Image: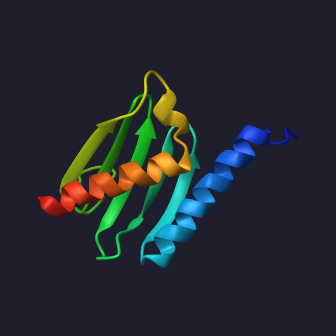
Amino acid sequence: MNEPTQWHQDREAEWETVFVTLRAEGWTVNHTGLAAPLQLEGRLPSGEAFYFRSRHDEVSLAIGGEDPSDSPAWEGRETYGTDSDASYLPGGDGLAILRRLVGGYRQG
């Protein structure tokens, strides 16, 4: 069995800190992958379903609709780095981008 690298362990720890922060704020959040692509799903504190994805050089947040990962009511995007940088998004950067995109959603 392959042991996780220190880099991978550090990245998981960063995201676990993000999950604790979001859950304390009332989010429901689960991850389906923390790398290539990074994917989170759950509910905002206000109850809307969301899907957050980070892949290649793009980060997106989809909110609402029957399935936000397929046909969201709202979607926002942000560029991150180049090539595959977003596929391995650090937790702190991910939280900042998530907050900006949610802000864009709330502003309409």
| Residue 19 placement, left or right of 106 | right
Q: Which residue is at a point 42% across and 66% down the rendered structure image?
A: 42
**Residue 80 visible (yes or no):** yes
- The x and y percentages for residue 27 are 42, 72
Count of number-bearing discs: 0
Colour setup of the view: rainbow
**Residue 68 visible (yes or no):** no
Q: Which residue is at a point 40% across and 29% down the rendered structure image?
A: 57
Residue extending farthest left: 108
- The x and y percentages for residue 78 are 30, 39
- The x and y percentages for residue 82 are 43, 23
Q: Quadrant of residue 54?
A: top left
Q: Which residue is at a point 49% across and 26% down the rendered structure image?
A: 84
Residue extending farthest top: 83
- The x and y percentages for residue 105 are 20, 58
The N terminus appears in which quarter of the rendering? top right
Q: Which residue is at a point 51% across and 44% down the rendered structure image?
A: 38
Q: Quadrant of residue 43?
A: bottom left
| Residue 101 placement, left or right of 87 | left
Residue extending farthest right: 1
The C terminus appears in which quarter of the rendering? bottom left
